[in-house]
Image: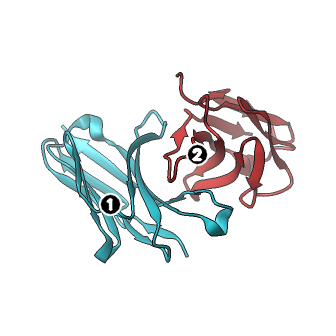
Chain colours: A cyan, B red
């Protein structure tokens, strides 16, 4: 069955520290997609990244980087030199190819990690 | 594009009243999703549509909840009658039909049922 585990409920760091948010997933499919979303205090859900199961290349976008490792079923998110504006809840999500879900891609969300960056 | 639009942003109502939440997806998106977010249960998928047709409503909590999508640019989620336990933030999201396309979320409607 699909499952996404974000074991870190809350993390606090001091500004300029690096921080890694963990995401571990379970799926029996070979084709799937992984996502990260940010939910700042204002409440909206902001899309950050999408990765398919056939692309294990790590990705870097400014201070953000993502490490996808199929061997450990993990898709971790690192923020380098954190800033106060990074304070938010971060969600990891999994979507399978979906033959069992009428060919569509429902998300399974993790429970989120609340990141607090202190000035 | 303006993104996914939801209205109202906040709704306060009394138990037993009917509540209607509205959503306008991003133009050209074929899929529309309704989610509910609470502290206890996190993000839950309630129902989703493909080309205006409901595909999976297994997440709808009970018969008091109903959703419609009369056309490609509008959807409603109705709760009748509302109960205090329905208090939550309700999100609408849409996406296109690419393989594994990401969902884009609206700002949410914060519902409080007294």
On-image quarter of the N terminus of chain A:
bottom right
- Please state the chain letter of the residue tagged with numbered disc 2 in the rendered image: B
Q: What residue is shown with label 1?
A: A55
Does B73 sit above or below residue B80? above
Left-right relation of B40 to B81: left
Which one is nearer the viewer's eye here, B11 or A20? A20
Q: Are marks 1 and 2 on the same chain?
A: no
Does A96 sit above or below residue A43? below
The residue at 19%/42% (across/down) is A63
Does B64 sit above or below residue A54? above
Provide residue A41's location: percent of width, then percent of height.
42, 37
Disc 2 residue crowd, few under 14, some 14–19, many 20+, Cα 10 Å: some
Q: What residue is shown with label 2?
A: B97
Left-right relation of B52 to A44: right
Circle on res. A30: none
Provide residue A77's location: percent of width, then percent of height.
28, 55
Q: Secondary structure at mark 1?
A: loop
Disc 1 residue crowd, few under 14, some 14–19, many 20+, Cα 10 Å: few
- Please state the chain letter of the residue tagged with numbered disc 1 in the rendered image: A
On-image quarter of the C terminus of chain A:
top left
The residue at 49%/77% (across/down) is A28
């Amino acid at each position: 069955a699909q499952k996404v585990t974000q074991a870190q409920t809350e993390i606090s760091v001091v500004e300029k520290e690096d921080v890694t948010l963990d995401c571990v997933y379970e799926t029996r499919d070979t084709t799937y997609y992984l996502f990260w979303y940010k939910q700042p205090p204002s409440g909206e859900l902001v899309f950050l990244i999408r990765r398919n199961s056939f692309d294990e290349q790590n990705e870097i976008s400014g201070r953000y980087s993502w490490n996808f490792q199929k061997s450990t079923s993990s898709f971790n998110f690192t923020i380098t030199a954190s800033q106060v504006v990074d304070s938010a809840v971060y969600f990891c999500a999994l979507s399978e190819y979906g033959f069992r879900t009428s060919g569509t891609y429902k998300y399974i969300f993790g429970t989120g990690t609340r990141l607090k960056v202190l000035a | 594009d303006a993104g996914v639009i939801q209205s109202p942003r906040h709704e306060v109502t009394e138990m037993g009243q009917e509540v209607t939440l509205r959503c306008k997806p991003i133009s050209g998106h074929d899929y529309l999703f309704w989610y509910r977010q609470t502290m206890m249960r996190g993000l839950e998928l309630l129902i989703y549509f493909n080309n205006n047709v409901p595909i999976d409503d297994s997440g709808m909590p009970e018969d008091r909840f109903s959703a419609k999508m009369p056309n490609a640019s509008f959807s409603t989620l109705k709760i009748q009658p509302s109960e205090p336990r329905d208090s939550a933030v309700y999100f609408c999201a849409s996406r296109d039909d690419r393989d594994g396309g990401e969902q884009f979320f609206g700002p949410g409607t914060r519902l409080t049922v007294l």
